[in-house]
Image (spheres, rainbow, N blue to C red):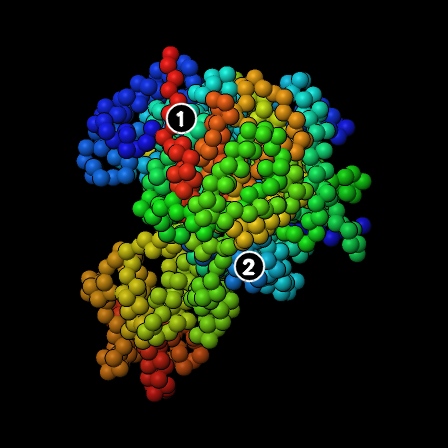
Amino acid sequence: MSFTSVKNNPVEKRVLEALDKAHLVQPILNAMVSFIDPLSQLEDLKSKDKNLPFYGIPVALKDLVNMKDTITTGSSKILDNYVSPYDATIVRKLKEAGAIIIGKASCDTFGMGGTNKTAATGPVHNPYDLSRMSGGSSGGSAVLVASGVVPMAIGTDTGDSIRKPAAFCGIVGVKPTYGRISRYGIIPYASSLDHVGFFTSNVSDAAVSLEVLAGRDDLDMTSSFKPVEKYSSLLKGDLKGKRFGIITNVTNAIQNKNTTTQFNNLCEKLKAQGAIVSEITLNEDLMKAMLPTYYVIANAEATANHSNLDSLRFGVQLEGKDNEEVMIASRTAGFGPLLRKRFVIGSYALFTENQDLIFRKAQKVRRLIVEDVKKALSEVDCLIAPASGNGAPLIEDTQIDQLSSEYLVAENFMALGNFSGYPSMTLPFGFDGVLPLGVNLTCKPFEERLMLDLAKGIEDLTQLNDLICEVKP
Amino acid sequence: MNYETVIGIEIHCELKTKSKMFSGAPVSYGAQPNTCVNEIDLGHPGTLPSLNKEAVRKALQACMALNLKIDPLIRFDRKNYYYADLPKGFQITQQFHPIGSSGYIDIDTAEGPLRVRINRLHMEEDTAKQYHVEEESWIDFNRAGTPLVEIVSEADMRSASQAMAYVDKLRNILMYLDVTDGKMEEGSLRCDINISLRPEGTEAFGTKTEIKNINSISNIEKAVSSEIIRQKALLEAGKEVQQATRRYDDVAKDTVMMRLKEGSVDYKYFPEPNIPPIQLSQVWIDEIRNSLPELPEARALRYKTLGLNEYDIKQLVQNKALSDFFDALIPSIKNVKLAANWCCGDILSALSQKQLEEKNYQLKLSELREMINALHDQAISSKQAKDIFPHLLKGENYASIVDELKIVMVSEHSSLLKLVEETLDENPQSILDYHGGKDRALGFLVGQLMKKSKGQANPAISNQLLKTELDKRKP
Amino acid sequence: MEKHSKAYFNNLAHQLRFDLTDKEAQDIVDEFSILIDQMNLLNTIDTTGVEPMVYPFEEATSFMREDIVDHVLSAQEALKNAPSSKNGFFITKKVVL
Ligand SMILES: [Mg+2]
Ligand SMILES: [Zn+2]
């Protein structure tokens, strides 16, 4: 559902319709964690300029985004009763732009997962096939846009948590440059890899969204001072002379011939538009090392980031005879088994005796990976590859060989954008049966304008914009 | 066997800023609990740190005064541990790249001057305050996130008095910089003292204990002395010193065990990913260096050139508030020595330290100055000054006090001479006694003269005049 | 304590202020061998002379916040989420020193 089509309805109607629809599909998709009464926001809107970019547009937040006086659980048990005492910077920006926030969307607990199966409220279903997963961690947000509940939803992306679910759900998912959108007020996973981004149903809406969300925030010291460009008005979709580099490590690892064929077709079409498409091979050893590198850095940062969850100042507290017992009981019950495991491993990597061998080793490999990507991008405008070898997996699927190159490379390469902080996005480019397939673009730092322009060019070729998969009870 | 004491000291010093180290919440001592916090200080999910520039400026000033080498690339790390007073479950500190390293200060000790090397100075954030009430702990997060510098000395001190002199000097320097209020009793300056003993002449360090919670400078000497005695007794009895954290108990006048140190805790330090490295500009650093406030040593030198004696210099310099008072007083003072006497004497006993620090008194400097100058000019007597001073303290003006108390100083030569002659005329026997060698006679005559003048004759001049006239009347 | 045994990970979890079930501890022991394999992938990469990368972008900034009080919560807001509070304080079961 595009911004344009939403705007056909009067404000109040479109917001209430979005909420109704969210409620209606909830038993089927399980995408929402909490709903927000829009009344006071609608009231505030009355004094606002009708030309604001998000004027009266219903929006959903990933359940990691704090908004004053709303429940923010991080899709965890330990924050089940947490009421944010403050607004995330992006919430302030969205409100200023006229958006009406209707609720919080499900995610993997604290964004730590790629399936959305770890959410405290259970898995989110893919609207294209309810037995399949949404992808994660921003699964709820992706599904809300894909099923036409809202035209835009906020997500976060630490490994591929926006771009993977966007691919599985047939929509646009943007992870801009690290520092482009403030992280203030977003429950973290791993601070040096976390990015805030969003889902829309077309590239133009993505450009509008980025324009609203981007910009310097003094509350986030890692946020960039670079001026925000007029992404939406500069969107042309001109592919002529644009240089695409296919990541062959990814295409070679993909086993699904249907995906490969459609991707090759897309590349031919790009060439037909005057684009220069070449092949780029990244260092294969580094590509294979990406997953363990990611695992070490992300979990080490995560274990420290979530040490604040001790149930003393907020969160669900359990009984114990002294403070330490209370903390242990609450954290044991409040984190699922997966999180506890990851925290143990992350913490292990941080022990002084292990840091050189594990944590700093991973940080060094990260640098090598980033240098390799930087070198590749010095020759092209954009790296391109299918976002996944296949459509969304079955929710029940647990059979993934963790050391196969299809898994290590094809299913995890998008973390390149998190290691490097470079802007990266996916958009639909085809279908495998009923399941959407996404293509991923990665550009040089702060070249979002170019990235969106290339995406627009692709969208014009595929005509796969504004896909809505209606689900009926 | 003789033992040598080895002492190293870590000082945590709260910086005098308006807002927290990483948040825009106020820093305030003694406020209602949990009213000086925001979501950042409480470690709420999603919050991020934003560094306070003034805290960095004050840390730089401290580095400069302590002769530390400054690292202009500011970096922070996480120190991970779980405790009820630590909201994030980690403290943001500077483990790997302290802002200052390898400095020193020179202290005066009974054994002569001593240079104490300072290993490092780093910035970090304070924790919350806990009150343990029966089966509960009550927590106030107002202090959480207050900017701190931690100053770590080398183990260069060898006695309790050296330890005290070091902390005293360091505290004084920091107070001269105005980077801290230095109040040990309120915990804005806290020291952890590491003490070990070793057989004289040996190199290896003995097992050390750490003493915490010392709430005054004088307790440093007491705490260290009693700990030295305790450790020595253990060693002489062939027992081992246990590695432990102890605290000084003011009532028991001894150190008591807080907890044993079982191995070392692994704090899993790693660089803080939410704070990028911050490059300080050389221009800013130079600006701070060039406008550094006068430090105690420089002030002592300046007082020496004013002609003050060692005792007064020491009295003044060790009390910054008093010394500041003195400095404010001395412009157009005719006799700085006299001013120093008044400051170290009557002023110090009349005004509390708090009044001096907060400049919270009614006394007007201009009026005090006028009185001291009058005293110097012998326009009034010391006795008259003592009468005037309480009125000055109430904020009254010198002229009106003199008026009110009908203070007249007869020092004009002709009027005095007249009084002297009258006195002598009335007491012929005393003249004889005086010349007969009875010293008491002069005192008696001075008394008579004072009586006659109703206490307003200038005693010094009168005395001189009496002697001259007596000599003229030598029989 | 044998390295990478169940007891070892139980102890580690305890330091992180949570407990593992017996099964979880066993899972970690089992997965640790996979993890070690993956670590070995890292170790095949020569990182001699390479600095650890802590931030995506490493240019130093010069920004520091001015020392201004600009945001404070009321005690009521500060305590709103507290599981237990009294007289303006957060209350917890006794902290063992
Ligand atoms: Mg420290
Ligand atoms: Zn410290």
Query: Are dots 1 and 2 in contact, CB under 8 Å?
Result: no
Say if A439 sits above or below C9 in the image.
below
Classify the position of the N terminus of chain A by image quarter.
top left
**Residue sitting at x 39%, y 47%:** A238
Camera-nearest residue between A247 and B319: A247
Q: Position of residue A154 (x, y in %)?
A: 40, 33
Classify the position of the C terminus of chain A by image quarter.
top left
Q: Position of residue A373 (x, y in %)?
A: 57, 48
Q: Position of residue B60 (x, y in %)?
A: 49, 58
Camera-nearest residue between A73 and A452: A452
Q: Position of residue B422 (x, y in %)?
A: 25, 78
**Residue sitting at x 69%, y 21%:** C26
Q: In the image, which disc is placed on residue A106?
A: none
Q: For the residue labelled by badge 1, is the local secondary structure a helix, a strand or a loop?
A: helix
Whether the residue carrying mark 2 lies under 8 Å from ligand 1 is answered with: no
Side of A130 relative to B415 (left or right):
right
| Residue type, label 1 | Ala
Residue A198 at least partly seen: no
Side of B340 relative to A8 (left or right):
right
Give the Cα separation between the discs numbered 1 and 2.
52 Å
| Residue bearing the label numbered 1 | A146
> Which residue is outermost to the front?
A272
| Residue type, label 2 | Asp
**In front: label 1 or label 2:** 1
**Residue sitting at x 63%, y 63%:** B114
- Quadrant in which residue C34 is drawn: top right
Whether the residue carrying mark 1 lies under 8 Å from ligand 1 is answered with: no
| Residue bearing the label numbered 2 | B71
